[in-house]
Image (cartoon, grey):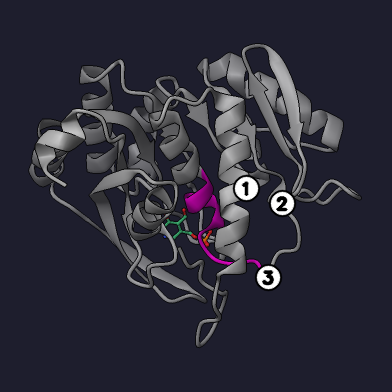
Amino acid sequence: MTAMRRRNGTPVVLAFGGFDPTGGAGVLMDSRAAAAAGVHACAVVSCLTVQTTASFSRFASVPRDVLDESLAAAAKSFLLRALKVGMVGTRAAAEAILTFVAAHRDLPLILDPVLRSSSGAPLLSSSALPAYRQLLRRAAVLTPNLPEAEKLLDRRIASFADAAEAAGELSGLTGASVVLKGGHFPWRGRRGTDIVFSDGRTTLLPPIGARRGDPHGTGCALAALIAARIATGDAVVPAVLAAKSLLSKLIVGGFPSAEGRPTLFA
Ligand code: PLP
């Protein structure tokens, strides 16, 4: 399909995030998830990561001028309908995406606040925090998991009712709709129930069924699918519902890796 035709209709998402060479998370996953939702994704790599499916080693920066020029190139090539931001990593990346967002105020920002890997490695450097805090206030949709919500609010979340309050609090602080993902909820019968706080209302979304071995990249994929649905014109709650349903299909199609967690397959 030509750039011209995409400009005229096909929804396009821009994914800004880390490059995970296993393909299980980051912008490779984002682009496959968007494709599964029928949406074209272009991607700008915020930072390179070195990781296996079992452990995270380190991340390396992409120069600021390359980030700025790549973001501008994506915006010039397509009429972007949504921006999904995942792992930001460096201060240069946080500042570059903040500058881009400030210049594209109509572009809905779906921000997955990736702070640490599952294995505990920090995925956002402390020097990136000032710009990242401003980015949080530009988000249309935030998709934290439980540890990320606790970190953003700087408090513990002690129960499911407290989690529902926390989603509202985060929304109040940022102005964003909040999708508090239930995958880490330790409370009986609540694991996998996502809490959506949007337009002053709380909606609970039930779990998507049996998980196979906790695949890597489900958080990345969910936020990318939400962005894809928002790009096609969905409001937040229908976008999250559709994203969960699509994600369940990707999880069923997941396959085992040589070590570590299974990989989603779209
Ligand atoms: N690498 C990249 C590029 C990511 O974006 C993420 C999470 O979003 C991770 C690694 C961490 O993945 P996991 O939570 O499966 O460790």
Q: Quadrant of the C terminus?
A: bottom left
Distance from label 1 to label 3 (Cα)? 15 Å
**Front-most of residues 193 and 136:** 193
What segment is highlighted magenta in the picture? 214-222
Q: Secondary structure at mark 3?
A: loop
Q: Give coordinates of residue 98: x percent, y percent.
A: 28, 28
The answer to whether 42 is drawn above or below residue 118 in the figure is: above
As for residue 217 lying within the magenta part, the answer is yes
In the image, farthest residue toward the bottom: 258
Question: Which of pointers 1 and 3 indicates the residue nearer the eye?
Answer: 1
As for residue 51 lying within the magenta part, the answer is no
Sequence-earlier tag: 1 or 3: 3
Q: Are marks 3 and 2 in contact (CB under 8 Å)?
A: no
Q: How many dots with numbers?
A: 3
Q: Amino acid at mark 1?
A: Ser
Identify the mark at residue 208; answer none if there is no mark: 2
Residue at the (55%, 81%) spot, across then down: 256
Q: Secondary structure at mark 2?
A: loop
Which residue matches tag 1? Answer: 245
The answer to whether 12 is drawn above or below residue 219 in the figure is: above
Q: Are marks 1 and 2 in contact (CB under 8 Å)?
A: yes
| Mark 2, other Cα within 10 Å: few <14 / some 14–19 / many ≥20 | some
Q: Give coordinates of residue 30: x percent, y percent.
A: 39, 52
Say if residue 83 shows up in the picture.
yes
Distance from label 1 to label 2 (Cα)? 7 Å
Which residue matches tag 3? Answer: 212
Q: Are marks 1 and 3 in contact (CB under 8 Å)?
A: no
Q: Give coordinates of residue 16: x percent, y percent.
A: 30, 44
Q: Give coordinates of residue 65: x percent, y percent.
A: 8, 41
Q: Amino acid at mark 2?
A: Ile
| Mark 1, other Cα within 10 Å: few <14 / some 14–19 / many ≥20 | some
